[in-house]
């Protein structure tokens, strides 16, 4: 799971547990144990369901798998990659290989290599191929 999803589900879990405790305290004051058990079970089902949906999303969908790969790259200092730059005629201009994270937008790719050197490649005038290694 991504860091944001873990934090979100953890906060949701804490909120639900707090609500269950508060409701249990109220129902105990009124001596209604059946309601207290029902509230506890409902809270547990919501928590289990939330975590199950999160686990399914991040392991069962392609969008979830991409999000996990992005977090892996962010937390581990990048992914081992090869960046090959070609001009408009298909001739190779440059090639970079190493472990780095890549940032991109409509007209450029930005990354810092393992030596700490920043590379900005503007690609509207050519092609860039980025391969993950390993």
Image (cartoon, rainbow, N blue to C red):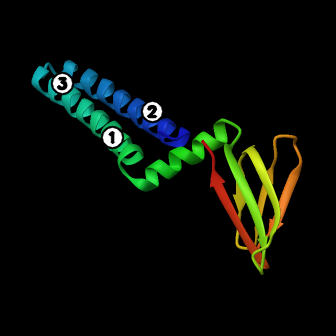
Crowding around mark 1 (Cα neighbors within 10 Å: few <14, some 14 to 19, many 20+) is some
For residue 90, above or below residue 112: below
Which residue is at 42% across, 45% downward?
Answer: 58
Label 2, secondary structure: give it. helix
Which label lies toward us, 3 or 1? Answer: 1
First in residue order: circle 2 vs circle 1: 2
Observer-nearest residue: 12 or 26? 12
Query: Marks 2 and 3, how far apart in space?
Result: 23 Å
- Above or below, comparing residue 86 to residue 102 in the picture: below
Ranked by sequence position, the earlier of labels 3 and 1 is 3
- Residue corresponding to mark 3: 36
Mark 3–mark 1 CB contact (< 8 Å): no
Q: Indicate the secondary structure of the residue bearing disc 1.
A: helix
Which of discs 2 and 3 lies nearer the camera? The answer is 2
Residue 78 image point, x, y percent: 69, 42
Residue at the spot x=74%, y=61% of the render? 84
Q: Is residue 118 left or right of residue 7?
A: right
Q: What residue is pinned by disc 1?
A: 50
Mark sitting earlier along the chain (2/3): 2
Q: Position of residue 95 (x, y in %)?
A: 79, 57
Q: Nearer the viewer, residue 88 or 4?
A: 88
Which image quadrant is residue 116 in? top right
Q: Quadrant of the C terminus?
A: top right
Q: How many marks?
A: 3
Which residue is identified by label 2? 10
Taking the spot 20% from the left edge, 24% from the top edge, the residue there is 27
Badge 2 density bin: few <14, some 14–19, many ≥20, Cα 10 Å: some
Looking at the picture, does residue 28 appear above or below residue 101?
A: above
């Amino acid at each position: 799971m991504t860091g944001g999803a873990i934090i979100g589900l953890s906060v949701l879990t804490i909120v639900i547990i707090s609500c269950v405790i508060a409701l249990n305290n109220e129902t105990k004051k009124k001596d209604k144990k059946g309601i207290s058990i029902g509230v506890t079970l409902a809270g547990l089902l919501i928590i289990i369901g939330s975590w199950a949906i999160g686990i399914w999303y991040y392991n069962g969908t392609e969008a979830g798998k991409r999000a996990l790969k992005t977090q892996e790259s962010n937390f581990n200092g990048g992914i081992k990659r090869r960046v090959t730059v070609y001009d408009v005629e298909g001739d190779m201009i440059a090639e970079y290989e190493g472990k780095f994270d890549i940032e991109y937008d409509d007209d450029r790719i930005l990354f810092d290599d393992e030596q700490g050197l920043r590379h900005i490649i503007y690609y509207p005038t050519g092609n860039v191929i980025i391969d993950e290694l390993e």
